[in-house]
C-alpha cells in the first residue's frame, strides 16, 4: 500500500527535524579538553634535616627546621633550629620527600636573622649548585630569605644553607624551609 501524500511528507519532515536536532546537539556538545601533562608547581617542607651543630635535641635541633612554619613571632623559640653556640660557620642541610625541578627556596627565619651567606641546591645524584650568596638582611623578623631561580634542568633533593654567624655573633634561628618546584 502506498502512503498517502501527507504521510509521506510527515515522515520526510520528521527525518529532517531529527537531522537538524542531531546536528545542533553535535555543535553544542562540550569541547573535550586536550589532555596534556601540565607541570604541577608545588611547595613542600623539609622531611628531614641535619646541621653542623644544634643548640639542643629535640628542641632547637635541625629537625625543628622540618615541616611547615610554626613560629609567627621574632623570638627565641625551641621550634626553630639554632646552632650550638651562635657563632662561626654553620650549615643546615634539608632533605625533601619529592625531588623536583626547583623554582624557589624560601627560608623562614624567626630570630637573629642576618647570618645566611649561601644557599645551594643538591641534585638527586649529589651534585651541588650555588643559587645565592651574599649578606642576608637582618629584617624583617620574622621574615624570609626567598631565592627564586629559573627552573632547574635537574631534580633537586636537598637544600643546603650556609651561615656565617660571626657576622652577627648570634643564633640565626630557622623555623622552616620551603622548596618550590615541579615534579
Ligand atoms: Ca619549625
Image: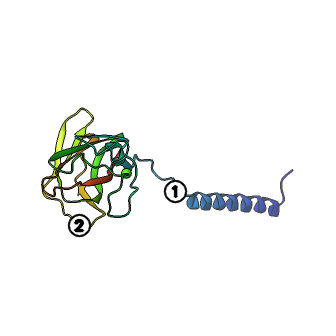
Q: Is residue 76 visible?
A: yes
Asked if ligand 1 lies within 8 A of label 1, the reply is no
Q: In the picture, residue 134 is in which quadrant?
A: bottom left
Q: Which residue is nearer to you in this view: 78 or 12?
A: 78
For the point 84% across and 59% down, the residue is 4
| Nearer the observer, 31 or 83 | 83
**Upstream in sequence: badge 1 or badge 2:** 1
Q: CA distance from mark 1 to mark 2?
A: 51 Å
Query: Is label 2 in a helix, a strand or a loop?
Result: loop
Q: Residues within 10 Å of mark 1 (few under 14, many from 20)?
A: few
- Give the residue drawn at x 27%, y 35%: 124
Per the image, the residue denoted by label 1 is: 31
Q: Where is residue 178 drawn, in percent x and y?
A: 33, 51
What residue appears at the point 61 percent right and 62 percent down from the top-left corner? 24
Q: Between residues 22 and 121, which one lies in front from this camera angle? A: 121
Q: Secondary structure at mark 1?
A: loop
Name the residue furthest top.
Answer: 125
- The picture quadrant where one finds residue 116 is bottom left
Quadrant for the C terminus in the image: top left
Task: Name the residue tied to disc 2.
Answer: 139
Amino acid at each position: 500500500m502506498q502512503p498517502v501524500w501527507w504521510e509521506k511528507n510527515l515522515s520526510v519532515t520528521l527525518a529532517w527535524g531529527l537531522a537538524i536536532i542531531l546536528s545542533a546537539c553535535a555543535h553544542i556538545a562540550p569541547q573535550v579538553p586536550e589532555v596534556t601533562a601540565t607541570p604541577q608547581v608545588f611547595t613542600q617542607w623539609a622531611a628531614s634535616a641535619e646541621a653542623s651543630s644544634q643548640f639542643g635535641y629535640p628542641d632547637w635541633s635541625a629537625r625543628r627546621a622540618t615541616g611547615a612554619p610554626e613560629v609567627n613571632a621574632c623570638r627565641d623559640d625551641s621550634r626553630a633550629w639554632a646552632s650550638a653556640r651562635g657563632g662561626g660557620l654553620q650549615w643546615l642541610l634539608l632533605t625533601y620527600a619529592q625531588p623536583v625541578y626547583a623554582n624557589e627556596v624560601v627560608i623562614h627565619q624567626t630570630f637573629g636573622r642576618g647570618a645566611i651567606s649561601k644557599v645551594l641546591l643538591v641534585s638527586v645524584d649529589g651534585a651541588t649548585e650555588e643559587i645565592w650568596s651574599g649578606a642576608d638582611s637582618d629584617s624583617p623578623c620574622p621574615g624570609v630569605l626567598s631565592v627564586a631561580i629559573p627552573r632547574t634542568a635537574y631534580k633537586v633533593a636537598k637544600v643546603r644553607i650556609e651561615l656565617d654567624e660571626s657576622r652577627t655573633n648570634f643564633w640565626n634561628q630557622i623555623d622552616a624551609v620551603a622548596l618550590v618546584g615541579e615534579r
